[in-house]
Structures are given as structure tokens and as C-alpha cells.
Image (cartoon, coloured by chain):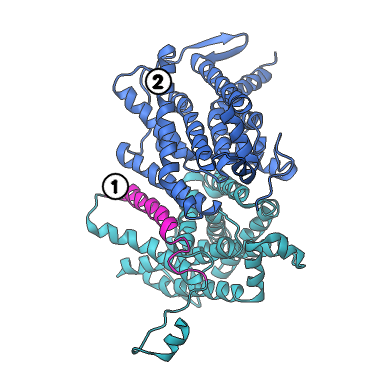
Amino acid sequence: MDYLFSVTITACIFITLAVSLNLVVGYTGMFSVAHAAFYGIGSYTAALLALRLHMGVAGAIIGGALLAGLVGFLISLPSLRLKGDYLVVGSFGSQVVISGIFLNADAVTNGALGVRNIPPPVLAGLVLDRTGAFVLPAAIMACLAVVVVWRLTSSPFGRVLRAIREDEIVTQAAGKNVVAFKVTAFVTGAIFAAIAGAFYAYYVSYISPDSFTIDTSLSVLIMVILGGSASVLGSVAGAILLVVVPEVLRFVGIPSTLIGPGQQVILGALIILFMFIRREGIIPEGARWPRVKWWPGDHDGAARAS
Amino acid sequence: MNGDLAVLFQLAVNGVVAGTLYIPSALGFALIYSTARFFHFAHGSVFLCALYAAFILSQRGVSFAIGPGLVLVMLLMAVVAALVGLLMELIVYRPLRALHATNEVLMVASVGLFILVNNSLVLAFGKDAKALSGAEIVGFNVGPLRLTGLSFATLVTGLICFVIVSQFLARTRAGKSLRAYGLNPRLAETLGLSGTRLVALSFIIGSALLGPAAVLAGLQQGVSPSVGLPFVLVAAIAMIVGGVGSVPGAAAGAILIGVVQNVGIWRASSQWQDALAFAVLFAFLIVRPRGFFGEKQRAVEV
């Protein structure tokens, strides 16, 4: 049972990450590979606040989110002036530099050994110290991310983001402050990643730099693209797919040394395949629930078909 | 000379050597980027394929001692790398382009290729680092400096690659066509140049340059699947720092990164090398986004 719980919680964490990255990559068209850096900042900040300053859950999570938001703001100012390909390399750089800090700033982050013994969170007098206790908070976090991103992107704000993605110059000409919109989207994404990170720190009670590398950033990016960029439900589907399928493979009986790279080989092939046959992802932008045809000649279905 | 300064000077020379090792891959990356106009991350995988091909040769008893034999091995690896790069273009990128893929789609596909190829190599050879046999490192002194035969080979190879690429682009008909296509693809096609062929040509030449680089890198740092990503990233940074579309720029960018990474050891610990490379990138992006010798204005994409 704990196993099922832990898969669910991991899926919720990655749903939060994927949905928030989608705001940046899918809706605004900023190809960022630095998401795991913000995930890590949230995680480390919350862990250190809780461990060293004995802060409560709320304080630690808000602290992590604030710091990630600030770093996101500082990074976004020079990077967002960059177009397309340059932004990829710029965000790659941010990711590598921040990963380097996690790994090498021994005095603060305890280097490669990571931060241990993060105290279990106390929520409304309850100590969350069993795996099962984290399921509900994880689900709430994922739902919150989904609802916020969904509302944001279906508001006029989201329309401007999509306009920026399609044509920055035209959006600027229409009197929108493109930089402000891009920075807002980027910082919002960073804050959600940090919340997921803080949650992760509390959940596993031990964090190390390995969890926040470029590989994690790429995985989340792949969830967004395979799921369907600019599609909230797509990101949810992508995250679930990439978390659950490897778990299933574990039961098929592939030797454990081959499983890691083996999965990656399949994933790489899957990405290329998707670029050929379904570029828009599993659930494309603007997809609606499929209409069920209750009986032949359903007038509603007929009306849509014509 | 003051002892501390001597160390600094030695580090700077080491940096130039490290930088010339980046030159072939930076030139290749820049050549492909300015022709095909997308980030070919799998450039790092092509590099790894050449690296592991060299490892297979070394296991079969081929000597990697510095000498005429090594030149032959480098040329052979250049052929291997060119084939791998061309295959990627023919099997993945060209069909995707035929399906009206945007540059972003091509880049995502190249990330997929990168993951696919690198992990296939891990499956085949394992994750641990290996060494190329027969690489003896002979050191000698030049004035106050300490150099090795390998660093000489690196300098010479980098220089030769640079001369070949710049002369090819400046003097041959194919090279001029490549530059023309890079500057304005539509105009070039209107004038009868075949874009498909030129892109394939850029993949052949750009990838072939990785062959010698892979041999030298294997001798210097050993063979491991984790070196592919830093190699392609440094190539990308060198191109941006030097200015897209400029051959001397890419070479200068490569050397600058090598020097900064090595001189950085003087005061910072070597763990910060990657971060230093990116610090150079950020400084350039903020102060001079078009690099040393970048085109004043990139061709407007219609």
C-alpha cells in the first residue's frame, strides 16, 4: 500500500512541476530547461529553514517559494531578452550554475552528501510521518497547480501569453508590456516548482543534488511536450505517463542494471516518434472531451460534423 | 618570474590547449547551426559515437601513441563521425523537415536522439569511465612551461581544423554555397542551390570534425558517456560567444572558454569549471549578445 502511495505522491509532485513548466514553455513559448533548479531551490530552502531555523511548514514553504521567485526574476531579466535557441542555452547555464551551487557550496548545502533528517511537517497539530499521510497534501498541491495554471491561461492574461508565443513583435505593437508578461509567467512557474520542491523535501526527509540536475529538468520538459504543450490536461497526462510507466516496467522482470538506461532509450525513441506522428502531444492544446455519440444520428454529433 | 604568476601563466597555457580541443566541435556545431538553423544537441552523441569507436579500436590493439599512426586513426574516426551525423540527418531530421517541422520540433527531436544514442551506449559499454590504451604522456619543458606531446597534438589538430574549415568556406564552391545558404536560404534556393544537399553537407563536415576531437579528448580525459553533454554545450557557448556565423568567432570563443575554465582554477576550485563557462556566456549575452564577430543583424526569418 505504501508503494502505491509513494507512486501517487511522486506523480503529484511531477504534475505540479509539469503544469507549471507548461505555463512557461507551452503557453508563453519560452523554452526553459532550468525548472529543476527552481525545484531544488525550493527544496533546499525549505529543508534548511526547517532544520536550522526550526521554522514551521508554512514558513519554510513560503521561504522556498520566495527565494525561487527572486532567483527566477533575476535570471529572467537577462535571459528573456534572448530568443528561442539562445534562451535554451541561457537556461541550461542557469541550471548548471545552480546545480553547481547545490553540489559545491558545502557550507550551506552540505555538498554531495545532501541535507538529512529534515523534520516531519506538522499540519494543524498532526505530525505527518507516514507515507500515507502525504497523499492528500500532494493531491491538494497538484490540484492547486492545475487550477491556478488553468485559470491563468484561460484569462486575458493567458491570451496575452499565447499572443507572445505566436508573435512577440505584434503583441508589443498592440501595447502589451511583453517583458513584464514573460517575467510574470516565468516567476509563477518558478514559484510552483519551488512549492513542489519544498513538499518533496518534507516528504523524503533527505535531499541531495542528484534530484535537481539537468536530467530532472529534461524529464519535466519531456512530460510537457509529450503530454501536449499549452494543454494543462496534457501535462497531467505526461507526468502520470512518465512516472507510472517506469514503475510498471519494474515488474516486467528487466534486470535492474539495464532498467535505467533501457527506459531512457525507450523514452528517446518515443520523443522522436511523437515528433513524427503527434507533435501536438497526447492531449493537444484546446482539446475538448470527446463527444460520445449515444445513438446513430445523434443530432448534436451531426451538427458538429457538418 | 614571480611563482604565483608562473602558475597563472601555466594555467593560461593549459587553458589555450583545452580551448583548442573545443575548436573542432565548436566549428562543427556552428557550421550545422548556421546552415540547418536549429540546435543539434545530438552533436554530443555523434562525439560519443566517435569516442567509443576509438575505444573499440584501442581494445583491438590499435596504438594511440602520438605519431603518424594517430593521424590515420583520427581520419578514420572522422569518417565514423561523419557517417553517424549524416545518418541522423537522413533518418530523423530530413523526414521531419519534409513534414514541415519547425526549428523547435527539430530541436526536441535532437534531444530525443541525444537521450536515445547516449543511453544505448551506456547499455552497450556500461557507465564507468574507460581509458584508451597506448597513450603514454611524455612531458617536456619549454622555458618555464611544462607541456606534453598530447597538448602539442591538440594544438596542431585544432589549428589544422580551423584552417581547413575557414579555407573551405572562403575558397571552395561548396563552402561558398554553404555560407550563402546560411545567410539567406530562400534566396540561395531561388538561385538554384539545393538546401537539402547543403544541409546534409554541413552535417557531414560538421560531424567529421568531431572525429579528431574525440580521439584527443579520449586520450586526455578517458572514455565515458557523461562527456557528451558538456562537449556539445561548450560548443554551443563558443558559437554564441564568438558570434553566430563567424568561423574565427567560434574558434576564439572555444579558446576563451578553455582559458577561463583553467585560469579559474587559480582562485576557485575546479568544481566550478562548468559554472565559469556559463558565466562567460551570461556576461556576453548581457553585454554583447551578438558575440565577438557576430553578424550585425540576423537574417530576418519570413
Chain ID of residue with mark 1: A
Mark 2 or 1: the one toward you: 2
Q: Amino acid at mark 1?
A: Leu
Is A196 a magenta residue?
no
Q: In the image, is residue B245 above or below residue A220? A: above
To which quarter of the image does residue A157 belong?
bottom right
Q: In the image, is residue B98 above or below residue B58? A: below
Image: magenta residue range: A256-285
Residue drawn at (24%, 52%) of the image? A254
The residue tagged 2 is B73
Position of residue B173 measured from the top left corner of the image (x, y, whole percent): 59, 28
Chain ID of residue with mark 2: B
In the rendered image of the structure, the colour used to display chain B is blue
The front one of A20 and B2 is A20
* Mark 1 closeness class: few <14, some 14–19, many ≥20 residues within 10 Å: some
Q: Is residue B130 visible?
A: no
Q: In the image, is residue B5 above or below residue B214? A: above
**Chain in cyan?**
A
Q: Secondary structure at mark 2?
A: helix
The residue tagged 1 is A258
**Left or right relative to A186: residue A125:** left
Q: Would you say the magenta stretch is mainly helix, strand or loop?
A: helix
Position of residue B77 measured from the top left corner of the image (x, y, whole percent): 41, 26
